[in-house]
Amino acid sequence: MLLVLVKNTNLLIRMASSSPSPSTHRGQQKCCFHEWMILQEADLSEMLQALTVEDNFGDRDVLLRQLVQKNVKHFQAYADERTRLAQDHVSPFFAPSWCSSLENSLLWLAGCRPSLFITLIYALSGIEIESHIPEFLQGTRTSELSELSLAAPQLSMINQLQRRTIKQEEELSQQLACLQEKIADQPFALIAKESSHVASQNVQADEALDEHSTSMVRILEEADKLRIKTLKEMMNILSPVQAVDFLVAGKKLHLCIHDWGQKRDIKHDYFQV
């Protein structure tokens, strides 16, 4: 576990200390994502190992809480690095060439929808309940249905979190829609109309696009903040073992979708280098 921790720390140092030149910026954005995926695998391995540890007088809960906090910090570090890299060129984050076409089709504001965290916990809870029904009917299981079975107070808090999150998602989606509509509005339409040639350079266009990019960076940052905020609130609602079970399932899903998408792109000769 110490080796995994050292690897995780080294990855975070590289993510936080890189200072890409304009010529290598796209490579740095791609590298940031790939290092994040490697860190996901390392964190997953560490959490799976921790779940096998026997609980001695609550020591296991302490370990699991530490892992939850570390995973949230890793997510925050990744979001901060994305924001830093986006200052130079934000558009690639909304249609990343380093992701598969499947992953890009699932993106919401350069990432996953925060409300999917809640959908996942509901789905996992239902799956766990169904998987233990025979044991309850046979009388061989009398405790909680599973670690991911949600108590009534937890369900109530998660339901409230879901409502707040969806509302904030809609607000950010509307902000992006407004930015997209402005591309066909002034000053872009006027600049395009007055251009002598389609490929001509235009100082006004650069200025307008710079302003547009600034707004896109802000939306990316706000979307990442909502993702992290939702995750933190979810972690506070769940018990330590529930939180780690949830993080494990989420990382497995993320890594599986990445792998499935790459394989499908190769199959259809659509893989992007």
Image (spheres, rainbow, N blue to C red):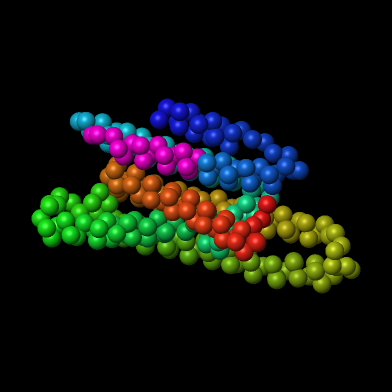
Q: Residue at x 88, y 67 (%)?
A: 197
**Location of residue 96 by image quarter:** bottom right
Q: Is residue 44 above or below residue 273?
A: above
Is 54 included in the stretch rendered in magenta? yes
Q: Pick out the residue farthest to the left.
A: 139
Q: Nearer the viewer, residue 244 or 227?
A: 244
- Give the overall secondary structure of the magenta segment: helix
63 lies left or right of 210: left
18 lies left or right of 157: right
Q: Residue at x 62, y 64 (%)?
A: 268
232 lies left or right of 208: left
**Location of residue 208 by image quarter:** bottom right
Q: Residue at x 69, y 39 (%)?
A: 20
The quarter of the picture where the N terminus appears is: top left
In percent of width and height, residue 64 lies at: 32, 37
Q: Is residue 103 above or below residue 14?
A: below
Q: Nearer the viewer, residue 92 or 141?
A: 141
Q: Which residues are magenta?
A: 39-55
For residue 35, say whether it is visible: yes
Q: Pick out the residue farthest to the front.
A: 267
Is 271 included in the stretch rendered in magenta? no
Total numbered circles: 0
In percent of width and height, residue 117 lies at: 40, 55
Q: Nearer the viewer, residue 85 or 42?
A: 42
Q: Residue at x 64, y 66 (%)?
A: 180
For residue 165, say whether it is visible: no
In percent of width and height, residue 222 lies at: 52, 53
